[in-house]
Image: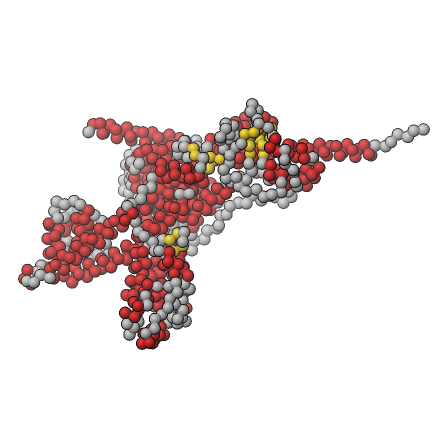
Amino acid sequence: MMMKSTDESETKWKIDDAAELARDFWLERDGISALKLTEKTISDHGNHEKCSSHHELQGDIFYAQAKKTDDTDLKCLYLFASVDAYSMATLLSPNALTLRSFRGYARSLIKLGDQLRINKFYEKAVSKAKLGMSITSPQGKSTDGGYFTKIKTELQNWIDLATTKMQATVAVSDIGTMDNQKEPGEEDTSFDRLKKIWVKLDDKTKINFLVVDFEKLIGYIQDKHGTEVKEHFQKCIPIANNLRWRCWKCHICSQVNYCFTDCKMHILDNHVHNSEPDFSARPKCVDEILADMICCGDWKPVDTAEAENLIKDRAKRGEEFVYVNGWCSDWPEAKDRERENVLKQFAEVLKSSCAKENCTLSCTLWDWLRDYTEENLELPGVPGIYLDQCCFFKNPQCICFLDLKHLEHILKYFRQLTTDVRASLVPKVVNQFWENSQVKERIDLEGVATYNLLLDKRLLYEEELESDKIGTVEHYKSTGIFEDVMPKGDKIVSWILDCPEIDREFVSQMANGVHNSKLWLAALRIVRCVIRKKESYYDKRRKMLTYEKMLGEAETICDREDTRKNVNQRSTYESALRMKCEDLVGKQDDDTKCFLSVVRDVFERQSSPSFEVFEDKKCISELSSTVPNDDVKKSLLTLRKSLKEKFPLIDSKILQNKSTYEKLIDVFPKLSAVEYRLVVLPFVKKFLQDKLKKMMKTNSSSVAAGDSAERKPKKRHL
């Protein structure tokens, strides 16, 4: 016991010490080091209560990063990461020590609402701020009364602000990415002159532009940018054999890969920690045939009165309706604008869940929709056996027969399946970074003791270059590879001049392998949040299945009383259920706990299952002792109906979550890519610009000298 206490104290000390060091990094404006240290601590110690301070610090860093960026999508990505960080901080330690986390939680949610114009975030902000307000007394030295009161005041202000925004139309100005536009008159007037000079150069001189003297380039960087930048640049040159310009570096550990897929698998296996349940426990989506039926229809309302007469007429003649891919053109269309509008909206929701690459419509949800249609479609006088022969309810067009009231109900029901904004937002942001990291030009090396950079010979041609996705570095002993090059055109001049300014911070980050680190870790938080959500969905699904099983047990007990031959031996449903609860005394399995929950819900006449674990069997006796049989039966039916509506939704939510996860996992290798040519090429271009401009200057001097000689008066000879 003593040993366990000592180990726990040492763990707490390590976590607190790491938190203090991470805060120091953050105060020194080294956010990357702070994030890496907190991430390592969280990975090492899991859901330890003391890790709440590390989650909170990550929330602060991601929120600060969101404030710094002007790009709306990138801002939202960092806000989502901060929300998850604050969420975990409040879950691990929901007391006064994490009151700041509740404040940060509410603040980030409101900012997300402002950016995305979605009321749901304001509602959640109010909920989380109220949770923070419910904390009554400070604990520990770090939460004095004045500070505690100040945070409470801020929380109330966030509640008031979010409430106001929910009640009014959110008017937020769009913040777009600032385009790097040149000022009027900024255009380089020497561009045409450089092209004219290039045209006059002989082929040998042009080819020499492809051979960049490494020592001269290093000297140029030293003169223009200093020693630190030069050293960072040198780290980005793969001198050894078999290295590449491109590799993939993990932002948590030191793993380096030379393949997109290998990097992805490393991150998923070692840092994402996603586990899948048994195959039998996973919900299934509808098949491709049904998905095609749903997507190909025009979804027009059917005139049920005319359709009824048409069915009767064909039934008499023994004719059936012919369906092509789930739709029949014989049904009369109704001129009903309201039904048509609702059907159009519903069709859009349904079709979006049936996309081939992203099918999230579960079989259980489709079965519910078909059963609901069959239960609520009124076609009096139409024989059911005839509809069965036509496979009427197996085709999606049967939904078009529903009246306005029932169409509105299914639309409202399906809209509970909201789309996860992160599924499109995160890939959009990351893909932009990925596209910007693509390089078309090859760069090879020449020499043994001293090196030259050999540029891509295609630069001297007029052809379009494709991205070099492999990025291998070839080593040559001489520049003989350019002997067959025949320069054409002046496109290389445009290439040399198309160069961004040197970003010293970017060069430093690339050299040290920490570029994109903040974005990478923000994406990791979002993916882990998606995984936790999946786990909660499966846990809820398991509870629903157990509840359904125990609900059936309760119904069986009641039915057993009805079937007793001796009326005098029959007990009330309530008494029979109580006796069963008494028989379960001493059992602690999940089924027993769930059965007690079912009995409690029945006796309390709940309208839907509560799913809270009900462990104290003695409390059953304290519940109402006058529950008539009719009320028990009614309550059982109500609970089963509610469960029947909830279960299909959870299946589709699981499928949606899976789809979101699959869209997000490709972001890691894209953000882990290290493309050293992004550092090398701007320096090479600046170096070649300087070389071209010196040529232009020399040429101008020569022209000026020639003009001066022509203007000089000639001596007269007598």
Q: Is residue 361 left or right of residue 194?
A: left
Q: Is residue 228 left or right of residue 124?
A: right
**Looking at the picture, how far across and down is residue 422, in whole percent?**
40, 47
In percent of the image, x 40 and y 54: which residue is there?
A: 355
**Looking at the picture, how far across and down is residue 126, in whole percent?**
34, 49
Classify the position of the N terminus by image quarter.
top left
Q: How many marks?
A: 0
Q: Is residue 83 above or below residue 327?
A: above
In percent of the image, x 48 and y 50: which residue is there?
A: 174
Q: Is residue 280 visible?
A: yes
- In this view, the residue in front, 189 or 538, is 538
**Looking at the picture, how far across and down is residue 223, in whole percent?**
59, 27
Q: Is residue 226 left or right of residue 310?
A: right
Classify the position of the C terminus by image quarter.
top right
**Looking at the picture, how far across and down is residue 366, in whole percent?**
32, 58
The outermost residue toward the top is: 449
Q: Is residue 209 left or right of residue 39?
A: right
- In this view, the residue in front, 13 or 473, is 473
- In this view, the residue in front, 16 or 556, is 556
Q: Quadrant of residue 275?
A: top left
Q: Is residue 251 visible?
A: no
Q: Quadrant of residue 179?
A: top right
Q: Is residue 61 above or below residue 601?
A: above
In percent of the image, x 13 and y 56: which residue is there?
A: 557
